[in-house]
Amino acid sequence: MMTLALGPSWLDPDYLLNTFGIWGLLLIVFAESGLLIGFFLPGDSLLFTTGLLITSKQLDFPLWGAIGLICLAAILGDQAGYMFGKKVGPALFTRPDSRLFKQENVVKAHEFFEKYGPKSLVLARFVPIVRTFTPIIAGVSGMRYRSFLIFNVIGGVLWGAGVTLLGSWLGNIDFVHKNIEAILILIVLISVVPIIIEFLRARGKAKRSAAADAGSGRDAVAPTAQRGRHAKR
């Protein structure tokens, strides 16, 4: 396997698979599926690349074995997230921001869960960042465990098997097979897109908040100044 010198190594699925192998992949899938520290991991591109490299014979592991283990790791990751949310409860919403934890991610996942209900556990699998926090929010909200388990399994299988099989299917296309390095570079670039979007959204939100605060400050000063002029008269 080739290693791409593009961007940070943790965003490079080929580098991750080359360095940590299938077992490292399973750990990443588990972490991204339900651990707070896993929200930044490139799960989609990693699964896609796994299917691609297995089909192109650059990763020596049975495809269906990899799919079965990936689905299991995804389901267990959500399970861990649910149990964590159930234990931590409302305290999660008052936890201060840190380098790895942002309160806005919790709020976003909570809104997603409220909007789509139990099926959010399936839909969130295909939404970076949200998929990490949604099972935790399900635990916080006290979702019935039986319902959680059913949707957890459905989502884990659809995501784990679906994305990996998509990569495997494309690996059989002659053009893709002959241009794997270019395809992997494209995958890395796509992996960066959600992070850039989140950064720009957060930046825009901060600017709008600052502008609103400045506007409210001017509104508060104006009446005070008017009262001062009236008093002088």
Image (spheres, rainbow, N blue to C red):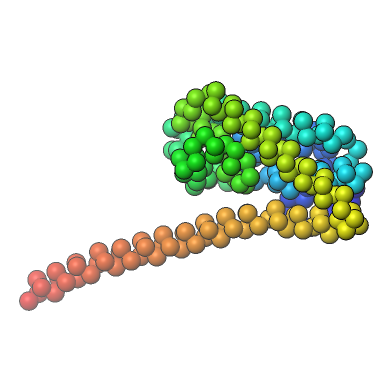
| Image location (x, y in percent) of residue 68 | 77, 30
Q: Is residue 4 left or right of residue 147?
A: right
Specify whether residue 179 is in view.
no
- Residue 223 horizontal side relative to residue 204, left or right: left
Looking at the image, which residue is at 82% across and 47% down?
A: 169
Give the quarter of the figure containing the C terminus: bottom left
Q: Among all residues in the image, which is located at the extreme top?
A: 146
Residue under the image location 23 percent in, 70 percent down: 222
Please give the name of the residue rendered at 90% of the width and 47% of the height, measured from the top-left corner.
Answer: 56
Residue 216 visible in rendering: yes
Where residue 114 sits in the image (x, y, percent)? 45, 40
The front one of 66 and 218 is 66
Residue 222 horizontal side relative to residue 128, left or right: left
Q: How many marks?
A: 0
The front one of 160 and 206 is 160
Q: Nearer the viewer, residue 118 or 127?
A: 118
Rendering quarter of residue 150 = top right
The percent coordinates of residue 229 (x first, y second) are: 14, 74
Residue at far bottom of view: 233
Q: In the rendering, at what x and y percent does residue 34 appear?
A: 61, 34
* Residue under the image location 16 percent in, 72 percent down: 226
Relative to residue 47, is residue 55 drawn left or right? right
- In the rendered image, the residue lying farthest to the left is 233
Residue 126 image-quadrant placement:
top right
